[in-house]
Image: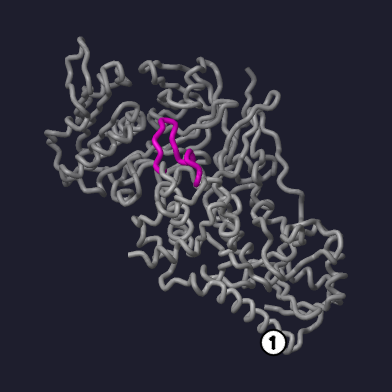
């Protein structure tokens, strides 16, 4: 993998040029939280730190959108064309890899997701300040990207190391060759040190949550555990965990009337809602909240892992951070392992 | 009435762009038009709709389609007609919810939409040379009728068919005309029961499981297929296992909440399976470990 050095001053010039080519989104701080914003000035860009408060999936898989019109079909615009995301963290890159499995790699391709995916350049960056809720190290990931990016930026003191991850990324460098230099051994060493430091921070946060067995084994083995009921007792069924999850992708198709035509709409749905699996006749395979909670864990940590070889969880900790009932996935899994 | 729906090939239906690039791939969500050619009132709550899609919609027995009532929404149905009928297909629908109630109000000549077919059908190759036991309850006979007609089409491939059917009362029996004829076919035995008879009823009275009491089938060479309401599926399956059917030779047609049909939206999941993609036909051995398989 090619590695380049980018000084702070050249970073500014490069980003400004990039933003002229396509809409460029980057993390910016608003009221103490990081959110993606369209580029205005380089000063607002926050590259290191941690993931944004909301998941990246919203830019690929809309909360609610029209997916078809009938009886006479009309062409529905898919996306706004090429765009660049800067400062995406490893967990959110992984979430796209997971969603690809569902929306692109199956028998049916999800046309809107596919289009946005093709239209997006991903320039990721290393985490430097994981939050207390972060636990990517517990789901086989690291707080810095290994794959799935076009370019990755590792913040150094007053500069960046740039790794190339794809041909698209290579192009973004070769077209602005003058901005990039060869990195020195020291700089590469600095990147390594920084990464180690972040990983150690993350490990320290999660020491008490670390389990001996894999998450998959734990949920498999504790299928009948009374703990599911106990944990579900704190759930208020708000659906936040699934909405804010970067990998949850359940949706509902519904039709609405518009003048002479009908629109088929697609809206995010949540497996935590009571009516989610209920059939018209009234039968409900997951009528109990505990069953729905368990289903969510099993889908993420067992079924998906079996089907695709990876967890449907990136350890981003958004569900932990946002849960109204203060249900912490790490804690639930730890308790499950220890219960006997 | 002008044709309201576009004509599309199966390639296009799967969301693959045509060479001219005119067809947009969002058609994975788009229904094709079908005209209601005939409506048969089976019971006060159940109607069979004969539909002619604007382009042939080929399916295998056991696969399902998503039927759109314009402006109301979609619901999944397994066609009840023979897949050998290429021009039309039939769905038998009980009035139980929002979409089915709207469908029941439609008249002959009106249009609905169809998307599909989706899912796996019955694995007919595995049925060859076997004695086949089909057990249906109530409106659950609908997908089994499609299977039965498929088997009948090539009856020489199979040793024998025993069709057992139960309904609540004689008034709740569906396909009354068909049933009479089916019993006269060679290699076919038909057993019908109702939970509760009426004055005119001369047939058997008892739950559908009572029809399984004196089976003459050679269990080792037999396979069983079950479809019906949850409670009937449960007790029938358990009885079959009790009688000596192996879970591998027992097939169930599962009913679940479906939205996309594409194996994505998550509604139909039971355990690790997407019923729309991995089913709706399952071997009992596949799903017996799944939580609440019969709910």
Q: Is residue A246 above or below residue B257?
A: below
Query: On the rendered image, what quadrant is the C terminus of chain B found in?
Result: top left
**Mark 1, residues whose alpha carbon is within 10 Å: few (<14), some, or many (≥20)?**
few
Which residue is more in the foreground, B168 or A117?
B168
The magenta stretch is A272-286
Q: Secondary structure at mark 1?
A: helix
Q: Residue furthest top?
A: B199
Main secondary structure found in the magenta portion? loop
Near-viewer residue (B36 or A259)? A259
Residue A175 position within the rendered picture, expressed as x and y whole percent measured from the top left:
83, 70
Q: Which residue is mark 1?
A: A189
Q: Say which chain tag 1 marks.
A: A
Q: Is residue B175 visible?
A: yes
Q: Residue at x 75, y 58 (%)?
A: A31
Left/right placement of residue A75 relative to residue A252 reads: right
- Colour scheme: one colour
């Amino acid at each position: 993998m090619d590695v380049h050095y980018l000084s702070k001053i050249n970073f500014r010039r490069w980003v400004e040029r990039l933003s002229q080519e396509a809409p460029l989104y980057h993390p910016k701080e608003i009221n103490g939280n990081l959110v993606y914003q369209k580029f205005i000035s380089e000063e607002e860009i926050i590259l290191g730190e941690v993931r944004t408060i909301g998941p990246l999936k919203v830019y690929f898989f809309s909360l609610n959108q029209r997916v078809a019109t009938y009886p006479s079909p009309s062409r529905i615009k898919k996306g706004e064309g090429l765009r660049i995301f800067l400062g995406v963290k490893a967990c959110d890159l992984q979430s796209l890899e997971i969603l690809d499995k569902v929306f692109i790699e199956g028998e049916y391709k999800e046309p809107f997701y596919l289009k946005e995916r093709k239209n997006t350049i991903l320039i990721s960056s290393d985490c430097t300040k994981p939050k207390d809720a972060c636990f990517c190290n517990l789901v086989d990931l690291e707080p810095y990207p290994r794959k799935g990016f076009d370019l990755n930026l590792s913040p150094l003191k007053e500069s960046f190391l740039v790794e190339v991850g794809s041909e698209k990324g290579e192009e973004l460098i070769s077209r602005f060759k003058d901005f990039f230099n060869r990195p020195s051994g020291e700089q590469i060493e600095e990147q390594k040190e920084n990464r180690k430091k972040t990983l150690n921070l993350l490990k320290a946060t999660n020491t008490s949550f670390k389990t001996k067995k894999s998450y998959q084994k734990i949920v498999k083995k504790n299928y009948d555990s009374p703990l599911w009921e106990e944990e579900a007792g704190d759930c208020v069924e708000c659906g936040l965990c699934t909405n804010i999850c970067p990998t949850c992708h359940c949706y509902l198709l519904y039709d609405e009337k518009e003048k002479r035509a009908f629109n088929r709409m697609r809206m995010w749905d949540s497996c935590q809602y009571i009516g989610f699996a209920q059939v018209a006749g009234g039968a409900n395979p997951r009528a109990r909240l505990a069953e729905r909670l368990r289903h969510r864990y099993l889908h993420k940590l067992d079924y998906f892992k079996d089907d695709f070889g990876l967890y449907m969880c990136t350890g981003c900790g958004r569900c932990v951070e946002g849960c109204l009932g203060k249900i912490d996935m790490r804690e639930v899994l730890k308790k499950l392992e220890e219960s006997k | 009435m002008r044709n309201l729906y576009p004509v599309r090939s199966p390639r296009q239906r799967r969301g693959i762009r045509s060479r001219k690039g005119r067809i947009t791939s969002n058609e994975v969500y788009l229904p094709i038009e079908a005209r209601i050619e005939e409506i048969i009132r089976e019971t006060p709550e159940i109607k069979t709709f004969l539909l002619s899609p604007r382009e042939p919609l080929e399916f295998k027995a056991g696969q399902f389609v998503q039927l759109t009532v314009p402006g109301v929404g979609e619901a999944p149905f397994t066609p009840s007609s023979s897949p050998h009928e290429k021009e039309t297909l039939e769905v038998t629908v009980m009035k139980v919810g929002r979409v089915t109630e709207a469908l029941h109000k439609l008249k002959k000549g009106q249009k609905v939409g169809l998307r599909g077919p989706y899912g796996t059908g019955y694995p007919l190759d595995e049925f060859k040379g076997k004695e086949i036991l089909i057990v249906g309850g109530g409106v659950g006979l609908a997908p089994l009728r499609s299977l039965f007609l498929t088997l009948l089409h090539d009856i020489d491939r199979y040793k024998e068919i025993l069709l057992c059917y139960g309904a609540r009362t004689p008034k709740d029996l569906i396909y009354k005309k068909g049933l009479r004829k089916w019993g006269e076919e060679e290699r076919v035995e038909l057993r019908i029961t109702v939970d509760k008879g009426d004055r005119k009823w001369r047939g058997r009275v008892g739950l559908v499981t009572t029809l399984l009491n004196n089976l003459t089938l050679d269990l080792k060479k037999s396979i069983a297929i079950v479809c019906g309401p949850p409670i009937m599926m449960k007790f029938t399956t358990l009885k079959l296992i009790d009688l000596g059917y192996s879970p591998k030779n027992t097939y169930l047609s599962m009913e679940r909440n479906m939205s996309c049909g594409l194996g994505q939206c998550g509604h139909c999941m039971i355990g690790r399976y997407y019923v729309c993609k991995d089913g709706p036909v399952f071997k009992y051995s596949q799903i017996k470990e799944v939580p609440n398989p019969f709910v």
